[in-house]
Image (cartoon, grey):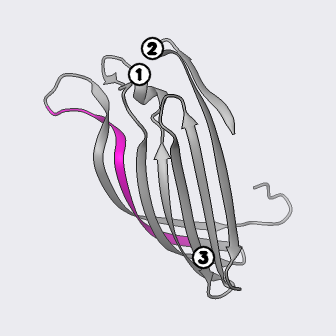
């Protein structure tokens, strides 16, 4: 893939960042009830170093309606133009930012029956060099885009859905 991110702003000026990348994705059935998947990506984005990310996952269905799954993913995010270049009296970008990196572990339960679907997953994300807007207490200066040394995040994701069908349904 090849493309460019571009902005022409009265505050940030004209900016263009070229990007090119390769993405691979695949999977296979290990048994009748266990599936494995993977993805890998390599990107060159502007002046940033080559960025690589990947993911592995397993899913086991122990009945037609019930399954458990787990995965491991390495993610990378390039800083936005706002984080790099935006400046006003309240905020100040940082043109020296590099990409943030994280490693995420996730496991969950998935339910699908008739028109109802639900899932719940717990995850742990270890982030290195994350980017956030920082304000020093009692400092009258602006919020600054800065690199965070480390952030560990535990979380829970849930989803509940229904699928309607029949005449007049457009969804």
Mark 1 Cα shell of 10 Å, populated few (<14), some (14-19), many (≥20) = some
Label 2: state its secondary structure: loop
Quadrant holding the N terminus: top right
Q: Which residue is mark 1?
A: 86
Is 124 in the magenta?
yes
Indicate whether 80 appears above or below 71.
above
Going by the picture, which residue comes out furthest to the bottom?
A: 63
Taking the spot 27% from the left edge, 45% from the top edge, the residue there is 149
Q: Which sits in the foreground, 93 or 166?
A: 93
Look at the numbered discs 3 and 1 and tell me whether their residues touch, using CB distance below 8 Å: no
Residue 62 placement (x, y as % from top left): 62, 88
What stretch of residues is rendered in magenta?
119-137
Q: In the image, is 154 to the left or to the right of 81?
A: left
Q: Mark 2 touching mark 1, by CB under 8 A?
A: yes
- Give the residue pinned by disc 3: 59
Residue 165 appears left or right of 128 = right
Residue indicated by mark 2: 11
The magenta stretch spans residue 87:
no
């Amino acid at each position: 893939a090849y493309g460019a991110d571009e902005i022409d702003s009265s505050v940030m000026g004209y900016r263009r960042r070229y990007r090119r990348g390769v993405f691979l994705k695949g999977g296979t059935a290990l048994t009748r009830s266990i599936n494995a998947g993977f993805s890998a990506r390599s990107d060159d984005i502007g002046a940033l170093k080559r960025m690589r990310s990947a993911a592995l996952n397993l899913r086991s269905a122990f009945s037609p309606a019930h399954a458990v799954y787990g995965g491991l993913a390495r993610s990378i995010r390039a800083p936005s133009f706002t984080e790099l270049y935006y400046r006003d009296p309240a905020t100040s970008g940082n043109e020296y930012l590099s990409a943030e990196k994280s490693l995420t572990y996730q496991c969950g339960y998935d339910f699908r029956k008739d028109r109802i679907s639900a899932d719940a997953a717990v995850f742990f994300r270890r982030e290195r060099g994350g980017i956030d807007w920082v304000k020093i207490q009692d400092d009258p200066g602006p919020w600054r885009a800065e690199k965070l040394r480390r952030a560990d995040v535990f979380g829970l994701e849930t989803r509940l859905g229904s699928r309607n069908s029949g005449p007049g349904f457009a969804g």
